[in-house]
Amino acid sequence: MIAAACGVDVPDTLTPGLEQYYLSLSSQSLFFNALPDSKTLDIQTTLDWAFSDYDNWLSLSSDNGHGDCSVTVSASENESADFTRTSILYLNASLYELEHKKQISIEQAAPQPYINIDLNEDSMEVSGNAATYRINIESNTIWTAHVNGGDWCHVSTADDMSYIDVIVEENTSGYERSVNISLIGATSVNFDIKQQ
């Protein structure tokens, strides 16, 4: 997003020392929800000002100007449940050789974690033959897969964590057997594999 300037130009006739120079902000910190969110930051100053080097998940309604201005600071959605995002906005104000600098601390909450598996039930029945079964996964957290209860079943996880392959060996025992598979991250889910 390209931010517009705010305020008016400095008059050419302004002489240093004839007006009081100051810079103040309505807040030194802003907190955002995990979903797209916006906050207003009020700038009070007699100086030229500009924001510099802010993260690409932040956008500003104005990133430079002169004098008082209300700036809308917006944060895009935080899609990862594994961390709270933080940043610092740097505001520099100057007139001739006079300079002021301010920092605004930014924090954005992490969303509620989820792991969704492409199963209608909390268990999956498979034949007694050796086979591989793919289960699609949707999640916003980093997770690891664990097999509990048998060494005849193994799990392979996709690099992008979009699915797991459940690999079962042939059942020669003559009895039904089962294992439990857990996906554990900031939250967890589990399901059973039942082999005939």
Image (cartoon, rainbow, N blue to C red):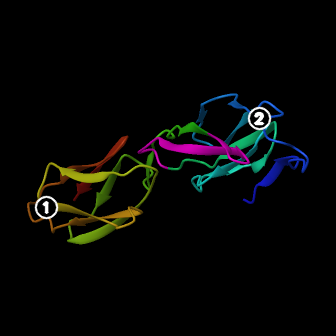
User: Which residue sits furthest left?
Assistant: 173
In the picture, which quadrant includes the N terminus? bottom right
Q: Residues within 10 Å of mark 2 (few under 14, many from 20)?
A: some
- Eye-nearest disc, 2 or 1: 2
Instruction: From the image, tell me which residue sits under label 1.
Output: 152
Residue 79 in sight in this render: yes
| Closer to us: 157 or 106 | 106
User: Observer-nearest residue: 18 or 116?
Assistant: 18
The kind of residue tagged 1 is Trp
Q: Give the range drawn in magenta.
A: 80-100
Left-right relation of 94 to 65: left
Q: Which mark is residue 9?
A: none
The dot on residue 45 is: 2
Q: Under tag 2, what secondary structure? A: strand
Residue ID at (62%, 53%) = 52
Q: Position of residue 3 (x, y in %)?
A: 76, 55
- Residue positioned 75% across, 60% down in the render: 2
Q: Are there few (<14), some (14-19), or many (20+) residues within 10 Å of tag 1?
A: some
**Percent from the top left, x then y, of residue 8?**
88, 47
